[in-house]
Image: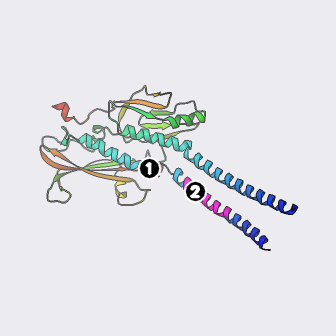
Amino acid sequence: MKRLNKRGTDKIISVYWFVILFIVAAAIVYMAVVFYGEPYDVRETEANIMINQIADCISQGGEIKDGVINEEGKLELTNENILSKCHLDFNVEDFKDWKKQEQFYFEINFYKFNKDAPDGLGSKFVNDTIAGNMNLKEYCDKKGKNFPVCVERNFYVLVKENPYIIKIKSIVRKTEKNV
Amino acid sequence: MKKRSSKKGNILTENVIFIVLNLVFLTILILFLFSKMGDVGTLEEKTAKQIALIIDSAKPGMEISLSIKDAVEKANKENWGGKIVFIEGNIITVQLKEGRGYSYSFFNDVELSKNYHYANEGNEYEFAVEAYKKGGAVESNEETE
Protein backbone atom coordinates (compact mmCIF):
# COMPACT_ATOMS: atom_id res chain seq x y z
CA MET A 1 0.00 0.00 0.00
CA LYS A 2 2.79 2.33 0.94
CA ARG A 3 4.60 1.60 -2.30
CA LEU A 4 1.47 2.16 -4.36
CA ASN A 5 1.02 5.61 -2.82
CA LYS A 6 4.64 6.48 -3.55
CA ARG A 7 4.21 5.62 -7.23
CA GLY A 8 1.04 7.71 -7.37
CA THR A 9 2.88 10.65 -5.84
CA ASP A 10 5.72 10.21 -8.34
CA LYS A 11 3.24 10.45 -11.24
CA ILE A 12 1.64 13.58 -9.80
CA ILE A 13 5.10 15.10 -9.31
CA SER A 14 6.02 14.38 -12.93
CA VAL A 15 2.77 16.01 -14.13
CA TYR A 16 3.54 19.05 -11.99
CA TRP A 17 7.09 19.00 -13.31
CA PHE A 18 5.77 19.31 -16.88
CA VAL A 19 3.34 22.03 -15.86
CA ILE A 20 6.22 24.01 -14.32
CA LEU A 21 8.39 23.33 -17.37
CA PHE A 22 5.61 24.54 -19.63
CA ILE A 23 5.18 27.76 -17.59
CA VAL A 24 8.95 28.41 -17.66
CA ALA A 25 9.06 27.73 -21.42
CA ALA A 26 6.07 30.02 -22.02
CA ALA A 27 7.79 32.79 -20.02
CA ILE A 28 11.04 32.38 -21.97
CA VAL A 29 9.18 32.36 -25.31
CA TYR A 30 7.24 35.47 -24.29
CA MET A 31 10.43 37.28 -23.26
CA ALA A 32 12.21 36.27 -26.47
CA VAL A 33 9.30 37.42 -28.64
CA VAL A 34 9.06 40.74 -26.76
CA PHE A 35 12.84 41.30 -26.83
CA TYR A 36 13.59 40.26 -30.40
CA GLY A 37 10.22 41.33 -31.81
CA GLU A 38 10.77 44.97 -30.92
CA PRO A 39 12.94 47.02 -33.24
CA TYR A 40 16.18 48.62 -32.11
CA ASP A 41 15.44 52.14 -30.91
CA VAL A 42 18.17 54.40 -32.31
CA ARG A 43 16.27 57.68 -32.14
CA GLU A 44 18.15 59.08 -29.15
CA THR A 45 21.47 58.37 -30.86
CA GLU A 46 20.17 60.01 -34.05
CA ALA A 47 19.05 63.10 -32.11
CA ASN A 48 22.45 63.36 -30.40
CA ILE A 49 24.31 63.00 -33.71
CA MET A 50 22.10 65.74 -35.18
CA ILE A 51 22.98 68.07 -32.29
CA ASN A 52 26.68 67.32 -32.83
CA GLN A 53 26.36 68.13 -36.51
CA ILE A 54 24.55 71.42 -35.83
CA ALA A 55 27.08 72.35 -33.14
CA ASP A 56 29.95 71.62 -35.57
CA CYS A 57 28.17 73.77 -38.14
CA ILE A 58 27.87 76.74 -35.76
CA SER A 59 31.10 76.67 -33.79
CA GLN A 60 34.67 75.55 -34.05
CA GLY A 61 37.19 75.34 -31.24
CA GLY A 62 34.82 77.09 -28.83
CA GLU A 63 34.33 80.09 -31.10
CA ILE A 64 31.45 80.90 -33.39
CA LYS A 65 32.20 80.23 -37.05
CA ASP A 66 32.48 83.09 -39.49
CA GLY A 67 29.23 83.52 -41.36
CA VAL A 68 26.91 82.52 -38.54
CA ILE A 69 26.45 86.05 -37.16
CA ASN A 70 27.05 89.04 -39.36
CA GLU A 71 28.69 92.39 -38.54
CA GLU A 72 25.34 93.83 -37.42
CA GLY A 73 24.94 91.06 -34.90
CA LYS A 74 22.18 89.32 -36.85
CA LEU A 75 22.02 85.61 -37.45
CA GLU A 76 22.97 84.56 -40.95
CA LEU A 77 21.49 81.10 -40.45
CA THR A 78 17.78 81.32 -41.19
CA ASN A 79 14.98 78.77 -41.08
CA GLU A 80 15.22 78.56 -44.86
CA ASN A 81 18.96 78.02 -45.25
CA ILE A 82 19.90 76.16 -42.08
CA LEU A 83 19.38 72.69 -43.59
CA SER A 84 21.64 73.30 -46.58
CA LYS A 85 24.20 75.30 -44.58
CA CYS A 86 24.50 72.56 -41.96
CA HIS A 87 24.33 69.75 -44.54
CA LEU A 88 21.13 68.16 -43.33
CA ASP A 89 18.62 66.28 -45.46
CA PHE A 90 15.28 65.48 -43.82
CA ASN A 91 13.99 63.24 -46.63
CA VAL A 92 12.89 59.86 -45.35
CA GLU A 93 11.88 56.54 -46.86
CA ASP A 94 8.33 56.07 -48.17
CA PHE A 95 6.91 54.27 -45.15
CA LYS A 96 3.36 54.68 -43.80
CA ASP A 97 2.69 58.46 -43.87
CA TRP A 98 6.30 59.52 -43.29
CA LYS A 99 6.42 61.44 -46.58
CA LYS A 100 3.46 63.59 -45.48
CA GLN A 101 4.80 64.54 -42.05
CA GLU A 102 8.45 65.28 -41.44
CA GLN A 103 10.16 63.00 -38.94
CA PHE A 104 12.74 65.49 -37.64
CA TYR A 105 12.78 68.84 -35.92
CA PHE A 106 15.43 71.00 -34.32
CA GLU A 107 15.72 74.48 -32.90
CA ILE A 108 18.73 76.56 -32.00
CA ASN A 109 18.50 79.21 -29.28
CA PHE A 110 21.24 81.76 -28.65
CA TYR A 111 21.50 83.20 -25.13
CA LYS A 112 23.83 85.74 -23.59
CA PHE A 113 25.87 84.26 -20.76
CA ASN A 114 24.64 85.38 -17.37
CA LYS A 115 27.05 84.43 -14.58
CA ASP A 116 24.41 85.11 -11.90
CA ALA A 117 21.86 82.69 -13.34
CA PRO A 118 22.22 79.07 -12.09
CA ASP A 119 22.15 77.65 -15.60
CA GLY A 120 24.08 80.59 -17.04
CA LEU A 121 21.25 81.49 -19.39
CA GLY A 122 20.76 85.19 -19.93
CA SER A 123 18.50 86.93 -22.39
CA LYS A 124 18.11 85.72 -25.96
CA PHE A 125 20.20 87.81 -28.29
CA VAL A 126 18.99 86.61 -31.68
CA ASN A 127 15.83 84.92 -32.90
CA ASP A 128 15.55 81.15 -32.72
CA THR A 129 16.35 79.12 -35.79
CA ILE A 130 14.11 76.16 -36.44
CA ALA A 131 13.71 73.47 -39.08
CA GLY A 132 11.56 70.41 -39.61
CA ASN A 133 8.18 69.40 -38.22
CA MET A 134 7.29 71.91 -35.49
CA ASN A 135 4.34 69.81 -34.29
CA LEU A 136 6.73 67.26 -32.80
CA LYS A 137 7.71 69.78 -30.12
CA GLU A 138 4.46 69.40 -28.20
CA TYR A 139 5.21 65.72 -27.43
CA CYS A 140 8.47 66.46 -25.60
CA ASP A 141 6.77 66.76 -22.20
CA LYS A 142 4.99 63.45 -22.60
CA LYS A 143 6.57 60.28 -21.36
CA GLY A 144 6.35 56.99 -23.19
CA LYS A 145 8.22 55.23 -25.95
CA ASN A 146 5.47 55.86 -28.50
CA PHE A 147 6.23 59.58 -28.50
CA PRO A 148 9.05 61.25 -30.44
CA VAL A 149 12.44 61.35 -28.71
CA CYS A 150 13.63 64.82 -27.65
CA VAL A 151 17.23 65.64 -26.78
CA GLU A 152 18.41 69.07 -25.59
CA ARG A 153 21.98 70.13 -25.06
CA ASN A 154 23.75 73.42 -24.29
CA PHE A 155 27.25 74.54 -25.04
CA TYR A 156 29.31 77.67 -24.51
CA VAL A 157 30.69 79.65 -27.39
CA LEU A 158 32.65 82.86 -27.77
CA VAL A 159 31.31 85.54 -30.07
CA LYS A 160 33.93 88.27 -30.46
CA GLU A 161 35.40 87.17 -27.12
CA ASN A 162 32.04 87.47 -25.33
CA PRO A 163 30.62 84.24 -23.89
CA TYR A 164 27.25 82.99 -25.13
CA ILE A 165 25.24 79.82 -24.60
CA ILE A 166 23.76 77.96 -27.51
CA LYS A 167 20.90 75.61 -26.71
CA ILE A 168 19.99 73.00 -29.33
CA LYS A 169 16.87 70.88 -29.12
CA SER A 170 16.60 67.97 -31.50
CA ILE A 171 13.55 65.73 -32.01
CA VAL A 172 13.30 62.48 -33.95
CA ARG A 173 9.95 60.76 -34.53
CA LYS A 174 10.35 57.60 -36.68
CA THR A 175 8.19 55.80 -34.10
CA GLU A 176 6.98 53.00 -36.37
CA LYS A 177 10.50 51.77 -37.10
CA ASN A 178 11.90 52.15 -33.60
CA VAL A 179 9.19 51.04 -31.19
CA MET B 1 11.86 -12.66 -8.18
CA LYS B 2 10.42 -12.37 -11.64
CA LYS B 3 7.94 -9.69 -10.55
CA ARG B 4 10.65 -7.60 -8.93
CA SER B 5 12.79 -7.47 -12.04
CA SER B 6 9.78 -6.44 -14.23
CA LYS B 7 8.99 -3.58 -11.82
CA LYS B 8 12.57 -2.37 -12.00
CA GLY B 9 12.38 -2.39 -15.79
CA ASN B 10 9.17 -0.38 -15.61
CA ILE B 11 10.70 2.28 -13.39
CA LEU B 12 13.71 2.57 -15.64
CA THR B 13 11.57 2.95 -18.79
CA GLU B 14 9.44 5.65 -17.13
CA ASN B 15 12.52 7.56 -16.02
CA VAL B 16 14.12 7.33 -19.46
CA ILE B 17 10.93 8.59 -21.15
CA PHE B 18 10.72 11.40 -18.57
CA ILE B 19 14.33 12.47 -19.17
CA VAL B 20 13.98 12.21 -22.97
CA LEU B 21 10.82 14.31 -22.94
CA ASN B 22 12.55 16.93 -20.79
CA LEU B 23 15.51 17.01 -23.15
CA VAL B 24 13.22 17.32 -26.20
CA PHE B 25 11.38 20.15 -24.50
CA LEU B 26 14.55 22.05 -23.64
CA THR B 27 16.04 21.45 -27.11
CA ILE B 28 12.95 22.93 -28.77
CA LEU B 29 13.19 25.92 -26.43
CA ILE B 30 16.88 26.50 -27.19
CA LEU B 31 16.31 26.11 -30.94
CA PHE B 32 13.51 28.65 -30.74
CA LEU B 33 15.76 31.12 -28.92
CA PHE B 34 18.57 30.67 -31.46
CA SER B 35 16.15 31.07 -34.37
CA LYS B 36 14.92 34.33 -32.85
CA MET B 37 18.47 35.58 -32.20
CA GLY B 38 19.65 35.05 -35.77
CA ASP B 39 16.42 36.14 -37.44
CA VAL B 40 16.95 37.57 -40.96
CA GLY B 41 14.63 40.53 -40.34
CA THR B 42 16.41 41.48 -37.13
CA LEU B 43 19.81 41.26 -38.81
CA GLU B 44 18.65 43.38 -41.78
CA GLU B 45 17.31 46.03 -39.40
CA LYS B 46 20.42 46.00 -37.21
CA THR B 47 22.80 46.34 -40.18
CA ALA B 48 20.75 49.07 -41.90
CA LYS B 49 20.47 51.18 -38.75
CA GLN B 50 24.15 50.66 -37.94
CA ILE B 51 25.25 51.92 -41.38
CA ALA B 52 22.76 54.83 -41.25
CA LEU B 53 24.13 55.98 -37.88
CA ILE B 54 27.73 55.67 -39.09
CA ILE B 55 26.93 57.80 -42.15
CA ASP B 56 25.09 60.34 -39.96
CA SER B 57 28.18 60.87 -37.83
CA ALA B 58 30.66 60.75 -40.72
CA LYS B 59 32.57 63.70 -42.14
CA PRO B 60 33.84 64.19 -45.71
CA GLY B 61 37.14 62.45 -46.31
CA MET B 62 36.42 59.53 -44.02
CA GLU B 63 36.83 55.97 -45.22
CA ILE B 64 34.61 53.54 -43.41
CA SER B 65 35.03 49.80 -43.10
CA LEU B 66 32.22 47.90 -41.45
CA SER B 67 32.21 44.22 -40.54
CA ILE B 68 29.06 42.58 -41.90
CA LYS B 69 30.19 38.98 -41.45
CA ASP B 70 26.93 37.89 -39.76
CA ALA B 71 24.84 39.42 -42.54
CA VAL B 72 26.95 37.80 -45.29
CA GLU B 73 26.72 34.39 -43.60
CA LYS B 74 22.94 34.76 -43.26
CA ALA B 75 22.58 35.83 -46.90
CA ASN B 76 24.59 32.77 -47.99
CA LYS B 77 22.38 30.54 -45.84
CA GLU B 78 19.31 32.06 -47.48
CA ASN B 79 20.89 31.57 -50.94
CA TRP B 80 20.66 35.32 -51.60
CA GLY B 81 22.98 36.24 -54.46
CA GLY B 82 21.91 39.87 -54.85
CA LYS B 83 23.33 43.03 -53.31
CA ILE B 84 23.36 43.00 -49.52
CA VAL B 85 23.73 46.74 -48.95
CA PHE B 86 22.57 49.43 -51.35
CA ILE B 87 22.24 53.16 -50.88
CA GLU B 88 19.89 55.34 -52.89
CA GLY B 89 19.77 59.05 -52.09
CA ASN B 90 19.76 59.18 -48.32
CA ILE B 91 18.08 55.82 -47.85
CA ILE B 92 20.02 52.70 -47.04
CA THR B 93 18.57 49.25 -47.70
CA VAL B 94 19.91 45.95 -46.41
CA GLN B 95 18.59 42.79 -48.00
CA LEU B 96 19.59 39.28 -46.94
CA LYS B 97 16.86 37.24 -48.65
CA GLU B 98 14.21 37.45 -51.37
CA GLY B 99 11.84 40.31 -50.55
CA ARG B 100 12.05 44.03 -49.88
CA GLY B 101 14.80 44.15 -47.30
CA TYR B 102 14.96 46.80 -44.60
CA SER B 103 15.35 50.51 -45.34
CA TYR B 104 16.39 53.35 -43.05
CA SER B 105 17.21 56.95 -43.86
CA PHE B 106 20.16 59.06 -42.75
CA PHE B 107 20.05 62.85 -42.47
CA ASN B 108 23.70 63.71 -43.12
CA ASP B 109 23.72 65.24 -46.61
CA VAL B 110 26.94 63.64 -47.81
CA GLU B 111 28.03 62.22 -51.13
CA LEU B 112 29.18 58.62 -50.78
CA SER B 113 31.74 57.01 -53.07
CA LYS B 114 30.16 55.13 -55.96
CA ASN B 115 32.71 52.35 -55.75
CA TYR B 116 31.88 51.00 -52.31
CA HIS B 117 32.88 47.38 -52.18
CA TYR B 118 33.07 44.28 -50.03
CA ALA B 119 36.53 43.49 -48.67
CA ASN B 120 38.02 40.64 -46.62
CA GLU B 121 36.22 37.89 -48.57
CA GLY B 122 33.02 39.90 -48.58
CA ASN B 123 32.88 40.18 -44.80
CA GLU B 124 33.56 43.91 -44.70
CA TYR B 125 31.62 46.67 -46.37
CA GLU B 126 33.86 49.60 -47.31
CA PHE B 127 32.86 53.01 -48.53
CA ALA B 128 34.15 56.56 -48.45
CA VAL B 129 32.43 59.82 -47.61
CA GLU B 130 33.46 62.19 -50.40
CA ALA B 131 31.89 65.60 -49.81
CA TYR B 132 28.73 67.35 -48.74
CA LYS B 133 26.07 67.35 -51.47
CA LYS B 134 24.87 70.96 -51.30
CA GLY B 135 27.09 74.00 -51.18
CA GLY B 136 26.66 77.13 -49.10
CA ALA B 137 28.28 75.80 -45.98
CA VAL B 138 29.16 77.92 -43.01
CA GLU B 139 32.78 78.95 -43.37
CA SER B 140 35.36 77.26 -41.25
CA ASN B 141 37.42 79.60 -39.06
CA GLU B 142 40.67 77.92 -40.11
CA GLU B 143 39.96 78.35 -43.80
CA THR B 144 39.41 82.06 -43.49
CA GLU B 145 42.55 82.70 -41.48
> Which of the chains bears the disc numbered 2?
A
Residue position marked by numbered label 2 in the rendering: A28
Where the C terminus of chain B falls, by quadrant? Answer: top left
Q: Is residue A85 left or right of residue B75?
A: left
* A39 to A67, vertically: above or below: below
Residue position marked by numbered label 1 in the rendering: A41
> Which of the chains bears the disc numbered 1?
A
Which residue ends up furthest to the top in the rendered image?
A: B115
Provide the residue span drawn in magenta: A17-33
Q: Position of residue B79 (x, y in %)?
A: 61, 33
Q: Earlier in the sequence, mark 1 or mark 2?
A: 2
Q: Nearer the viewer, residue A110 or A138?
A: A110
Q: Position of residue B35 (x, y in %)?
A: 59, 46
Which residue ends up furthest to the bottom in the rendered image?
A: A1
Q: Position of residue A95 (x, y in %)?
A: 48, 45
Q: Nearer the viewer, mark 1 or mark 2?
A: 2
